Image (cartoon, grey):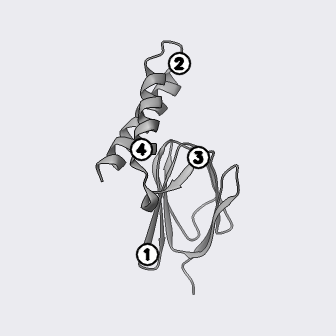
């Protein structure tokens, strides 16, 4: 019996990734890193800036997202996000610009605590990526 499920990641431009035979996915949920395996209970959760890890056999794919919603139901995982990129195609300039923009936003006194938390987390994750 198969221990895999399907995943689809959609961003505003297109269906970013559609894959079958996924054995595990780890997403950066607000509650913390959430690991999803076949037959996981149905969930819907918001995502914070971070890394999505997709395991399929011996292969691991990693993607950075800014935000999103994840839903798992009937062994099908859907992720909707406004911004995603493959870490393999890491563009140091894009990361540096994103860090600068987030830090500029953080310097504003007009943002609320939740936005400040998300921006700080985004900066932390992007800085960790730029070190690799």
Q: Which residue is mark 4?
A: 93
Q: CA gap, disc 3 to disc 2?
A: 21 Å
SS at mark 1?
A: strand
Residue found farthest to the top: 109
Q: CA gap, disc 4 to disc 1?
A: 27 Å
SS at mark 2?
A: loop
Q: Of the residues tagged 3 and 4, which is closer to the observer?
A: 4
Q: CA gap, disc 2 to disc 4?
A: 26 Å
Left/right placement of residue 26 relative to residue 17 reads left
Q: Which residue is mark 1?
A: 59
Task: Indicate which disc, 3 or 2, sits on the residue closer to the N terminus.
Answer: 3
Q: Of the residues tagged 4 and 1, which is closer to the observer?
A: 4
Residues packed near mark 4 inside 10 Å, few (<14), some (14 to 19) or many (20 plus)? few
Which numbered tag is attached to residue 111?
Answer: 2
Quadrant for the N terminus in the image: bottom right
Residue 34: give x, y in percent of width and height.
Answer: 48, 54
Q: CA gap, disc 3 to disc 4?
A: 16 Å
Residue 43 or 19: which is nearer the viewer? 19
Position of residue 60 relative to residue 57, above or below, is: above
Name the residue at 51% across, 73% down: 23
**Residue contact at pointers 1 and 2, CB within 8 angstroms:** no
Q: Of the residues tagged 2 and 4, which is closer to the observer?
A: 4
């Amino acid at each position: 019996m198969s221990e895999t499920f399907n995943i689809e990641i959609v961003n505003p431009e297109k269906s970013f990734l559609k894959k079958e035979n996924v054995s595990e996915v780890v997403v950066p949920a607000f509650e913390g890193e959430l690991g999803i395996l076949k037959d996981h209970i149905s969930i819907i959760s918001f995502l914070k800036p971070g890394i999505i890890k997709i395991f399929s056999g011996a292969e691991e794919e990693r993607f950075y997202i800014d935000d999103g919603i994840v839903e798992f139901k009937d062994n099908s995982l859907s992720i909707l996000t406004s911004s995603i990129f493959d870490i393999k195609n890491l563009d140091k300039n894009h990361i540096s610009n994103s860090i600068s923009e987030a830090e500029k936003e953080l310097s504003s006194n007009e943002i609320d605590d939740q936005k400040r938390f998300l921006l700080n987390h985004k900066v932390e994750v992007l800085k960790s990526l730029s070190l690799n």
